[in-house]
């Protein structure tokens, strides 16, 4: 029953939640009518009684939405994000909010005001970022699904590190209303779950046009669950071989094993080119930082969050931000403000925008020759806590495979595939054309069948 499922997840949360530091808050009692009574027809409430969590930058009415920041440590939004409202309407239970890198700025969940989340496969390792707490909760069986946000890989990279499935939808596919903005032209809400089919089920609920988000797309969501059940035979995957030099030996060996397994499912594999790939990381970090410097200007101590001391507005604002923002957020705000400043905007920001257009064209050309593009999700498995936290350039390179689809606004799916020599999860990333989520679900489910990997969590 729904009540039994709820009790099971809460017991698991009591057992491992503290060890993994993956929650900012957990609900003390059933948070939806689905914990009581008989379920309605499945098509009316497809997630009836299913417990999930949301990243702490997605608004849940009257619950702390701290975005991993001291500045918002006590802020409670008066409304639900559209994605959360749709989960409730589908009968899902919101079990809690999860630890994240502050304002989504990180690849390891070490940049959090409440300390780092930990990887359930090895608690000395990072769970990825910035949706690390969400991925850890799903992988450890503390939730059946999670909603994260993905700007440059923040759903896919934690899914990779923790061995779960994670989807970044097409830009505009899921409403951003109620998602605290980091970089508005890049941010997307996406699901994490133990399997591709579970991801498809959650995506089918939260996707779709929303009048509160002018960038949301008015297009049919289709039948994502049915797509996950379809055979993949006859589809074609493109592989940019040159990019594999950026990954370690275990990652490349696992990637090649996944391609061989897909060939056994009747999928054709062809080599493709992704030229100018070296500009993707640089363009992403310029654009994301520039948009962050504009979006985070609202946190001045007046309308939101904690207020610093000062004799006038300027001093109060400076005190608020100095005390409230963490080191990584300050670094990116400074970078973003610099690239937008007079005399430097053309040399940096406008050049990055032109590079983004180039990247979009590169992906469009590549996808004309195949149904999806396959790469590893990350260059290595989850790395040790503390290994990269003091070297921002080394940390940023963790996103080398994930920023391209983000810049192009394309859907991308992480599917766990195997393990490295230390027993840590590895994965495959599939990138499709705009609105190509169903194809990704079909191919992702084929990868699961072929490789036999199963997450160790709630499924």
Image (cartoon, helix red, strand yellow):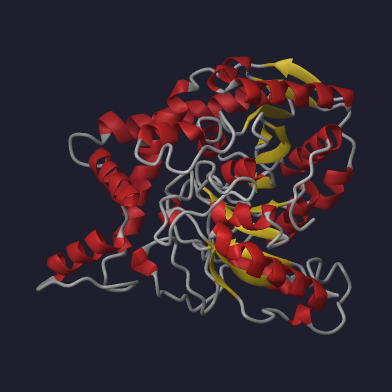
| Residue 347 horizontal/vertical position (percent) | 26, 29
Front in this rendered view, residue 224 or 317? 317
Quarter in which the C terminus is drawn: bottom right
Q: Is residue 433 left or right of residue 349?
A: right
The residue drawn where x is 49% and y is 79% is 78
| Whether residue 374 is situated above or below residue 152 in the rendered picture | above
Outermost residue on the bottom side: it is: 37
Q: Position of residue 447 (x, y in %)?
A: 80, 34
Q: Position of residue 205 (x, y in %)?
A: 73, 61
**Residue placed most toward the observer, 334 or 113:** 113
Counting labels gives 0
Decide which of 222, 426 is in the foreground and name it.
Answer: 426
Q: Residue at x 34, y 48 (%)?
A: 328
Of residues 406 and 245, the one nearer the viewer is 245
Q: Is residue 323 left or right of residue 353?
A: left
Residue pictured at 77% horizontal, 56% vertical: 201
Q: In the rendered view, does 237 fall on the left or right side of 115? A: right
Q: Residue 112 placed where, x, y %?
A: 42, 56
Q: Is residue 403 visible?
A: yes
Q: Residue at the spot x=42%, y=53% of the render?
A: 182
Q: Is residue 238 above or below residue 111?
A: above
Image height of 300 relative to 331, above or below: below
- The answer to whether residue 431 is seen in the rendering is no
- Viewport quadrant of the N terminus: bottom right
15 vs 227: above or below: below
């Amino acid at each position: 029953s729904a009540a039994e499922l709820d009790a099971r997840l809460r017991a698991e949360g009591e057992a491992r939640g503290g060890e993994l530091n993956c929650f900012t808050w957990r609900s003390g009692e059933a948070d939806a009518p689905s914990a009581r009574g008989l379920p309605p027809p499945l098509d009316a409430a497809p997630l009836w009684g299913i417990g999930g969590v949301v990243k702490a930058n997605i608004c849940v009415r009257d619950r702390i939405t701290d975005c991993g920041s001291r500045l918002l440590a006590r802020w409670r939004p008066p409304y639900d994000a559209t994605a959360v409202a749709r989960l409730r309407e589908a009968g899902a239970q919101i079990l809690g909010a999860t630890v994240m890198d502050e304002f989504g700025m990180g690849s390891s969940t070490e940049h959090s005001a409440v300390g780092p989340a930990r990887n359930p496969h090895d608690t000395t390792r990072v769970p990825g970022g910035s949706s690390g707490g969400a991925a850890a909760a799903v992988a450890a069986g503390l939730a059946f699904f999670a909603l994260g946000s993905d700007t440059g890989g923040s759903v896919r990279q934690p899914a990779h590190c923790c061995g779960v499935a994670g989807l970044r939808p097409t830009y505009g596919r899921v409403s951003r209303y109620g998602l605290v903005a980091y970089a508005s032209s890049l941010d997307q809400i996406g699901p994490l779950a133990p399997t591709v089919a579970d991801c498809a089920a959650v995506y089918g609920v939260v996707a779709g046009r929303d009048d509160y988000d002018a960038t949301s797309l008015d297009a049919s969501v289709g039948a994502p669950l049915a797509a996950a059940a379809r055979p993949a035979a006859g589809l074609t995957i493109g592989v940019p071989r040159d990019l594999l030099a950026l990954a370690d030996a275990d990652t490349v060996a696992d990637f090649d094993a996944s391609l061989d397994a897909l060939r056994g499912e009747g999928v054709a594999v062809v080599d493709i080119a992704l030229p100018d790939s070296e500009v993707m990381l640089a363009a992403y970090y310029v654009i994301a930082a520039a948009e962050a410097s504009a979006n985070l200007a609202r946190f001045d101590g007046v309308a939101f969050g904690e207020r610093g001391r000062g004799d006038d507005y300027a001093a109060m604002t400076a005190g608020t931000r100095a005390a409230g923002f963490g080191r990584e957020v300050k670094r990116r705000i400074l970078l973003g403000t610099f690239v937008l400043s007079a005399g430097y905007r053309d040399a940096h920001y406008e050049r990055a925008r032109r590079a983004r257009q180039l990247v979009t064209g590169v992906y469009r050309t590549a996808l004309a020759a195949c149904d999806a593009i396959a790469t590893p999700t990350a260059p290595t498995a989850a790395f040790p806590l503390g290994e990269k936290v003091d070297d921002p350039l080394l940390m940023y390179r963790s996103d080398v495979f994930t920023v391209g689809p983000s810049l192009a606004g394309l859907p991308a799916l992480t599917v766990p595939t195997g393990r490295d020599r230390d027993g840590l999860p590895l994965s495959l990333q599939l990138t499709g054309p705009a609105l190509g989520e169903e194809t990704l679900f079909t191919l992702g489910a084929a990868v699961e069948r072929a490789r036999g990997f199963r997450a160790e969590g709630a499924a």
